[in-house]
């Protein structure tokens, strides 16, 4: 506990200086998010996995401190002003957070106030962070924005290599390069940046040989993290990007897909990917058993996950209208399973259970409207990139609940800003 306390103090100091760096300019503010990732990797390069739940300072994950510093710098630079063109999203945002407050205290009456505050504030801050990042993005020239995105990819490649190195020499049992982050959270970030890697390749910002090296490191990192969500998200993201870019050029699309899938299969059937292939095969076996008998035997590896899914469905049935109220503690209060309790590892079931059909419907409408802005990005290359990122997230939500991951909203904020960014000038009108 003492070590975690000192770790929290150290990261507060790091974050304070990162905040001072971020408020110097719009460019610095956006770069600060890259440094927030680096601060979660390199100071702990000799450390094994510490865990997200154990590395908290006043209930806040220490890993989030540098990211929060970046968000605060964006808020300061925006002076609380928001772009007028996103007013529909602001209205939905206010409706959502107002509903969640009333849901928890009026309609449900939550028992775990601390859990409510922790998760409610995450919703308030994360979505607002997306808005202020979008404000910052319209102030940055395309050339600098591309440079920052390129550096983001190169940073993730270096971090992924660090994860591989730590796994090979035995510091960790997998290639998770952020010791204070759950491995699925880490691989979620890796998959989010795959379309950006493809973007900078298509724009000629890296050489073909460098692209292949980056791609190889991405694949190895995901295989060594041993995440089914990671490999499936990677395949989905890569294929969707190609489908958007070459949908009418089958002579390019089909050979590219065949080569890519051949490469993935070669890795999976090699000794490197053997364990992950086994997990995927067990997943298929579990699905077959569910289809044929409606349940999974306790001895199977996916038994706990299946029980959590069943538990979420039961919560939905008995709390359909208003849900359990905001917060993990309030969700678990209504969960009745004979396994270690947790959420269902499925965004759609978990948040339908937590928010109820009313709140979940508001959230889904919010996401649809957000997607509609991504579809208005004027630059074709950015359009393809952020369409792919959004759809990849929606796909991976079937395997996780990482909608409260701050870096997701930062990346969505970049896409949102691009949708309101004239090709040669910024937006000058504000909503507030």
Image: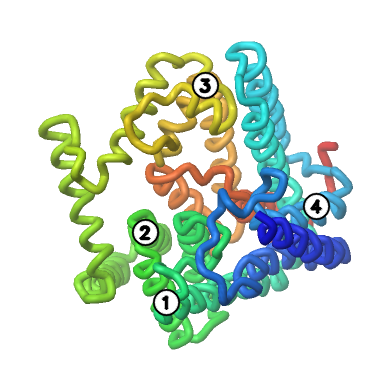
Indicate which disc residue 227 carries: 2
Residue 273 in the image: above or below residue 345:
below
Instruction: Measure the alpha-carbon separation of dots 3 and 2.
Output: 29 Å
Q: Quadrant of residue 184?
A: bottom left
Q: Which residue is mark 4?
A: 72
Nearer the observer: mark 3 or 4; the answer is 3
Q: Quadrant of residue 170?
A: bottom left
Per the image, label 4 sits on a secondary structure element best described as helix
Q: Are marks 1 and 4 in contact (CB under 8 Å)?
A: no
Quick one: label 3, few (<14), some, or many (20+) residues within 10 Å?
many
| Residue corresponding to mark 3 | 324
Estimate the spatial distance between the alpha carbons at disc 3 and disc 4, rounded to whole Å.
Answer: 31 Å
The residue indicated by pointer 1 is: 170
N-terminal label among 3 and 1:
1
Q: Quick check: can you spot residue 255?
A: no
Quadrant location of the C terminus in the rendered image: top right
Q: Position of residue 386 (x, y in %)?
A: 54, 55
The picture places residue 114, in percent across and down from the top left corner, at: 67, 31
Instruction: Say few, some or many: other residues with alpha carbon within 10 Å of mark 1 (under 14 / 14 to 19 / 20 or more).
Output: few
């Amino acid at each position: 506990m003492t070590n975690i306390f000192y770790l929290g103090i150290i990261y507060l100091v790091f974050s304070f200086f990162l905040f001072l760096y971020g408020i110097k300019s719009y460019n610095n503010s956006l770069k600060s998010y890259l440094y927030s990732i680096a601060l979660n990797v390199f100071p702990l390069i000799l450390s094994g996995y510490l865990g997200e739940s154990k590395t908290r300072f006043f209930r806040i994950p220490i890993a989030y401190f540098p990211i929060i510093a970046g968000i605060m710098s964006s808020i300061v630079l925006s002076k609380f002003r928001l772009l007028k063109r996103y007013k529909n999203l602001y209205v939905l945002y206010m409706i959502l957070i107002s509903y969640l407050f009333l849901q928890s205290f009026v309609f449900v009456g939550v028992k775990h106030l601390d859990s409510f505050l922790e998760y409610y504030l995450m919703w308030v801050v994360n979505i607002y962070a997306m808005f202020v990042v979008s404000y910052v993005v319209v102030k940055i020239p395309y050339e600098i924005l591309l440079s920052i995105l390129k550096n983001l990819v190169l940073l993730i490649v270096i971090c992924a290599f660090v994860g591989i190195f730590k796994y090979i020499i035995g510091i960790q049992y997998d290639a998770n390069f952020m010791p204070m982050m759950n491995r699925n959270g880490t691989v979620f970030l890796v998959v989010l940046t795959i379309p950006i890697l493809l973007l900078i390749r298509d724009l000629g910002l890296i050489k073909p040989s460098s692209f292949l090296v980056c791609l190889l490191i991405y694949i190895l990192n995901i295989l060594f993290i041993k995440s089914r969500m990671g490999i499936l998200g990677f395949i989905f993201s890569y294929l969707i990007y190609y489908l958007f870019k070459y949908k009418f050029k089958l002579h390019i699309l089909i050979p590219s897909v065949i080569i890519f899938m051949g490469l993935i299969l070669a890795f999976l059937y090699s000794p490197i990917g053997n364990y992950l292939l086994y997990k995927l095969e067990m997943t298929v076996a579990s699905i077959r058993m569910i289809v044929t008998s409606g349940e999974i035997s306790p001895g199977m590896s996916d038994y706990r996950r299946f029980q959590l899914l069943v538990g979420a469905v039961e919560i939905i049935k008995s709390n359909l209208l208003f849900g359990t109220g905001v917060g993990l503690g309030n969700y678990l209060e209504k969960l009745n399973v004979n396994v270690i309790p947790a959420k269902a590892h499925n965004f759609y079931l978990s948040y339908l259970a937590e928010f109820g059909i009313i709140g979940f419907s508001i959230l889904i409408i919010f996401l649809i409207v957000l997607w509609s802005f991504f579809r208005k990005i004027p630059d074709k290359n950015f359009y393809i990139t952020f369409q792919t990122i959004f759809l990849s997230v929606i796909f991976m939500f079937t395997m996780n609940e990482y909608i409260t991951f701050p870096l997701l909203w930062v990346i969505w904020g970049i896409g949102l800003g691009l949708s309101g960014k004239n090709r040669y000038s910024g937006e000058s009108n504000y909503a507030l």
